[in-house]
Image (tube, coloured by chain):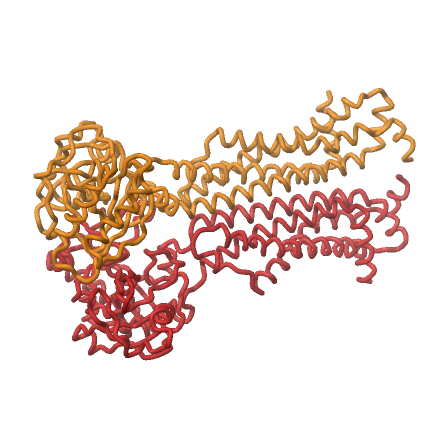
Amino acid sequence: MEIASIVSALRHHKAGAVLLALQIGLTVAIVCNTLTIIKQYMDQTQRPSGIDEPNIFTMYNQWVGDPPDLESRVLGDLAALRSLPDVVGAEAAGGYPLNGSGAAVGISRHPDQHYDDAWTTAVYYVDEQGQAAYGVKLVAGRWFRRDEISIQHSADASNPAVIILTEWAAKFFFPDGNAVGRLVYLASPSPSRVIGVVERMETPWAGLPHMDSFVERSVFLPYRYVSNGLWYVVHSRQGEQAEVMKAAQEKLYAMTPARVIDDVVPFSETRQRIYAHGRSSSLMLGALSVLLLTVTAFGVVGLTSYWVAQRRRQIGMRRALGARRMDILRYFHTENVLVAGSGAVLGIGLCLAGNLWLAHKLALTRVSPEHICVAALIVMGLSQMAVLWPALRAAAIPAAAAIRDL
Amino acid sequence: MMGYYLDLAIRSLRRNVVLTALMIVAIGIGIGASMTSLTVLRAMAVDPIPEKSSQLFTPQIDVWGPVTRGGDSTHDDELLPWLTYRDAMAFMQAHRAARQAAMYAVHLDISPQGSRPFAMHGRAVYEDFFSMFQVPFQAGSPWSAGDEAIRARVAVLGARLAQRLYPQGNAVGSELTLNERNYRIVGVLQAWNPTPQFYDMTRGAYGEPEQLFIPFTTAIDRQLSPEGGIRCESPPPSDWIAQLNSQCVFIEFWVELPTAAAVRDYRRFLYSYADQQRQMGRFHWPALVQLPNVTKWLVWQHAVSDEARVNALVACGFLLVCLINVVALILAKFTRRRSEFGVRRAMGATKSDIFLQCLVETGVVGAAGGLLGLILTALGLAADRAFVAGDLGRLAHLDEGVVTLALLVAVLATVCSGLYPTWRASQVQPGLQLKAP
């Protein structure tokens, strides 16, 4: 009964009601999409990289000039780093997870590289101590043995006889399971046998935009990384990182002073850096959403206040005819539910359409039903709160208003 | 007449201060948010070299085959962004463009007299780099082709590094120790910072350009490994010569093609080169080549980030919501004043008089909202500089363009959104309103 009368009353200010519903619809659509974007960013930043993050730091090292004995220098540095107290492991690397640069190769299940299933895959060069250096978890098979480690001297050399995959890569190349013992080809007819599978190892590019299919597509190769210009990845015992960071630099400088050590950072810093763009953008979107909700709430207050003022006489009459304050309050709240509710329905449609478009254009994940509900409920709840003040003012209108305003 | 309407507008707006404030704040916030994000977007989309962006091209060639073109799954129609050493050398020797330069990023250590060595981002380039990209010199000049031929150890310094190493300004002619070898400084640049740094965006498009330039041939001769990363089909060899002869890509290559005919010729040259390589058996798929200019290249390289696009989109949606909010409020306001309009109509005001009166009132609201919006834009950009990572923040600043745009958008949008309520108000029948209270 009441709803019918509210609807017929709304007919008298159609344009206002439609505009309010439209505003609420757009608000729902924008908030649910920004929620999805922020959630996607949070999921990304919290993705584990697979390495023992809290206890790993990295430093860039370059010797002055062009030392001819690079290999022995790297070996010397590694031995020195590994012998430091509280060091669990250390490795020389051309790139490490989330640092944004590294090497990638094409990997195929067939000897011919250019079959349909040759895929660009991130490679990490490691020796027999690589597992300790990164703190990765082996879920099947074994790690490299010392006698399997070599130096990649030329591109034409035969491929490594053995290889370790991430679990993601193992499932990718061998969907039927059981990757250990199977063969893959690295751009050459000579096969590499899978000897182990690690739980997870993110690629150097995992945090960058447009890399969604390239997050854990990485492998380990039994090669020593030798180059003038490399990173040392150092894994320290829990709680000892600050000490080890200092000791490692001092030790290396003491061994060879003619070098540049740069960019000594804990892994948490690396993570911060690669996700910085997403963080600032999420902050911005979050701030915009809050502002948007505020504007919409005040819009509801303003418009309802007008409707209340416009209907002073009618409200007075209803009060004179026996309506309680509660009834007036309920009237405006119900009216708001109707308007905001139809707005929210419109908003859900707009949200889905906007999300489809964004997903197509910008690789945004699909909006989840929970997000839609949360956004719609937030906006409707806010609208109900906003309507309370004008509704209370309406309820305070005395019955005498029916005649006084004539 | 306008003065009278203005007076009426201000009276009417002052009658309900809260509502007026609500409208002005809504427009202000909407303008502030949308202008902030549009300014950032515009800063990203700026043309780094406006005089020549349509004449500079970067050739690309499909050396890895259709499948293994990189990890970028969403844009697999694009080729490798770099060239192999041998292709770059072939293009240099063919000399088919008005200007051409192969280049790559290097990491050099500098050993100044009497202090600890430090590392510096540098770039190995051909001499055409400087003339092609219109790099301004404050002293000296680029090295010569002869220097390149004999792999001379010469260097050009950026303004900041020259200032740091030679505060007295005597850089040109001095010797500098780079990677334990002495280099003769032949030139010093003026401050030069093309943004985005289109010719190589691997180190971030909005950072500072390298401060140290050496001849490409010298860098290859000294076996300086590429700092910007190297992409290989198979595990990269550690041997330098093997690396140069491999299919590994790491070289940026830019050419200047001043006319449409030159572009056509160069494209033809690229096709025939790729085809010839295929016939030599280097690869066995159809020869794909591409020749994007700076503008197209920036699009491919995502110079304008998706985040900035989404932000701008959301902010514009936000402005729309604010405007709808304002329409609803103006509508309510004008509806309530029907009797006032009725009286004015009865006293002889025409429909267009009422229309104009309402228009002036919405215009005042729009202008006030625009002013507030400008203040908020300035605040928003300051917040952007404070919180947004990287160097982009300093690029986005308030200039006359933004100010004009913000005010224009605010007034136009408000007046447009006020049109329907204004029209409704002007339709009031004089007699009817006088009868009713």
Does A6 appear above or below B255?
A: above
Q: How many marks?
A: 0
Q: Is residue B226 left or right of residue A284?
A: left
The image quadrant that residue A145 belongs to is top left
Near-viewer residue (A116 or A299):
A299
Q: Is residue B267 something that shows in the picture?
A: no
**Looking at the picture, how far across and down is residue A23, in whole percent?**
62, 40
| B92 lies above or below A149 | below
Residue B402 or residue B225, whichever sits in front: B225
Q: Residue B81 is drawn in which quadrant?
A: bottom left
Residue B184, quarter of the rendered image: bottom left
Residue drawn at x 40%, y 66% as measured from the top left: B193
Taking the image as shown, residue A289 lies to the left or right of residue A193, namely: right
Q: Nearer the viewer, residue B151 or A58?
A: A58
Quadrant containing the N terminus of chain A is top right
Name the residue at 17% across, 38% down.
A129
Q: Quadrant of the C terminus of chain A?
A: top right
Task: Give x and y (percent) for residue A366.
Answer: 43, 35
Estimate the x, y position of residue B6 in percent, counting from the top left.
Answer: 79, 58
A147 versus B259 height, above or below: above
Left or right: B301 as drawn, with respect to B367: left
Q: Colour of chain A?
A: orange
Residue B178 in sight here: yes
**What color does chain B have in the rendering?**
red
Give whichever of A378, B379 is nearer the camera: B379
